[in-house]
Image (tube, grey):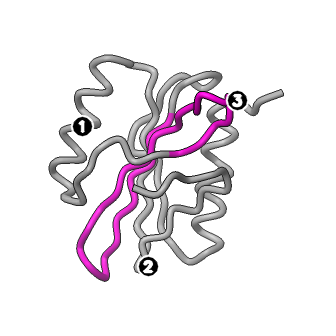
Amino acid sequence: MLLSTDIWVGALIRRAELGGAFAVVARKGDPRAGAVLVKVLNRADRTARLYAEATRLDGERVWMQPAATTEEPDLDAYVDRAVRRDPDLWLVEIDDRDGRHFLTEAVEKG
């Protein structure tokens, strides 16, 4: 059984805060089954990364970087387009001096 999105997001934010980062829900979507994007801001090198959940061909759920850029304005434009396609989308922003994402699931290297 999968967790509802609001509970999963709350757990991610809590992990980030326990790790010394700042995390916030920048956009709230459907509490039960909304998709989630995670934007990570790395203040040390002034870059950003965006993560989206995906399913591999073998059925394994992973996180991947849907945009090949590390420029925050470009990632924000990607998020805007994604929200137009899916109004139930969540956006979690994590501001961490080391650029950690705090995702516990598998993450594809971008």
How far across and down, in percent of the image, does residue 33 sit?
61, 22
Q: Residue at x 46, y 53 (%)?
A: 24
Residue for badge 1: 78
The three-letter code of the residue at mark 2 reads: Asp
Question: What type of secondary structure mainly makes up the magenta span?
Answer: strand
Q: CA distance from mark 3 to mark 1?
A: 24 Å
Q: Is residue 58 magenta?
A: yes
Give the quarter of the figure containing the C terminus: bottom left
Quadrant for residue 87, please give it: top left
Quick one: SS at disc 3? Answer: loop
| Residue, disc 2 | 98
Q: Residue furthest front?
A: 58
Q: Which residues are magenta?
A: 36-63
Above or below, 5 relative to 21 = above
Q: Would residue 37 be counted in the magenta stretch?
A: yes
The circle on residue 4 is 3
Q: Say left or right for 66 vs 12.
A: left
